[in-house]
Image (cartoon, helix red, strand yellow):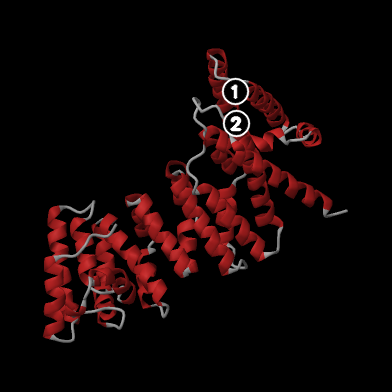
Amino acid sequence: MEEKPDKEDNHLQILLKSLQKASKDLQNVPIFTKNKTPFSIDPFLDLDKDANTNLSSNHELFKLSELLCNLKTLLEKLQKYQGYSPTSFFRRQITNYKIYQVAYAVDAEIQAYLDRESVKNLVNTLEESDEEDEKVRVLIEFEKRLSQGFDLGFQDLVLKAKVFSILERLLCDATCSTKVQNQAALAIAALIRFNKDVFVGLVLMGPTIRALISMSSSCSIQVLSLLIKTIRVPLVDELETYKEIPRISRLLSSEDVSIQVAAFDCILGIAYYGRKEAIDKMLRAGLIKRLVELQRSEHGDNFPEKIHEEEEEEESYVKKYPFAGCVARFAVQVEVGEVLSENERKEFKMEILRMVREVSISEAESATIAAEVLWGSSPWN
């Protein structure tokens, strides 16, 4: 008996998704369609009385039930207007237009119901379930829904359910698995892409940024990099105020290359959107020395003559040598950044060149990196 509600819910979900797909098909049928009944009307015509009664008995689906009855009536009427007389033609076009309007309303009503159930299930699972895989599953579904684009109704559901606060608690919960925390971080990034005007403020006011840095996983630092690109100067100012930039720089010494790469991407963002104080602190903390070491490592390349035998190999080359020309790439971001004055850019460039000479192990290495810095590289984006 305990499984019955779940089976009923599953059956209802399948029915609603089938009707939603059919309603989208109807919306795509031209109003001035040919003298032919669209294939997509079958799910509506086949909707039996029992199914519609079940929908109408649910107060959340009562409006949908009425819309479906109206749509079924219009579709049946359309089948009668299949003649070639002027009267049949005009009646068919008027009916097609009404069908389009009702189909649009059906689609919206079903989506609103599915969204309500989805957010309710998300909150219940994240707060009450002990199953990690279930938490990951609902977070992935949530991220996919956000990727469909902005929807004011869905945003209201998310805000009322305080979903952002729940995701933030997961990030800060030391007892939570890394797998769940990483997925929560990706969900927060999806919320920012969904509507940064609303959710950026929540990121800046809460512990999200520090939690991402404390996690120090490849995923969390990649999310941090995305947030830097999205929020820009205000976020870099926040990192500088709370002295988080040195912690990011230290991740360049991680034994995990994927974490090093993600941290370097953050460094490039800080260089582009950072003020003088932020960049000065990175340089004083030995950033150039570490970048030269990375460029000298097996994942860098101080001697670019082996680059690209063929143009098609560029992507695989970048994956194999993520720190190739990394000193120059950092210098370019400082030089083209949004915040620094012209004098500050020139001073930092000269300081970077001086530090390169200091930490290089040979004149050849120093000359190679200096040439890259002077000639520049591709800006970070």
Is 231 or 344 nearer to us in this picture? Answer: 231
Residue 161 appears left or right of 374: right
Q: Could you say where residue 101 lies in the image, as x and y percent from the top left?
A: 56, 25
Q: Could you say where residue 272 lies in the image, as x and y percent from the top left?
A: 26, 57
Is residue 122 among what the camera can see?
yes
Q: Residue at x 22, y 55 (%)?
A: 337
Residue found at the far top of this picture: 87
Q: Residue at x 60, y 23 (%)?
A: 82
Q: Could you say where residue 345 lies in the image, as x and y percent from the top left?
A: 16, 59
Relative to 175, does residue 228 appear above or below in the rendering? Answer: above
Secondary-structure class at tag 1: loop
Is residue 111 among what the camera can see?
no
Residue found at the far bottom of this picture: 362
| Label 1 close to label 2 by CB (< 8 Å) | yes
Q: Residue at x 51, y 35 (%)?
A: 28
Residue found at the far front of this picture: 84
Residue density around tag 2, few if under 14, some if 14–19, many if 20 or more, within 10 Å: few
Q: Give the residue number, with chain letter if any, for mark 2.
A: 37
Kind of residue at badge 2: Thr
Give the label on residue 82, or none.
Answer: 1
Is 172 or 280 nearer to us in this picture? Answer: 172
The part of the image, by quadrant, that contains residue 157 is top right
Residue 284 appears left or right of 96: left
Kind of residue at badge 1: Gln
Where is the C terminus found, in terms of image quarters? Answer: bottom left
Residue 239 appears left or right of 121: left
Secondary-structure class at tag 2: loop
Of the numbered discs 1 and 2, the one sitting upstream in the chain is 2
How far, Cα to Cα, is label 1 from label 2?
9 Å
Q: Could you say where residue 246 lies in the image, as x and y percent from the top left?
A: 35, 68
Relative to 157, does residue 293 appear above or below in the rendering? Answer: below
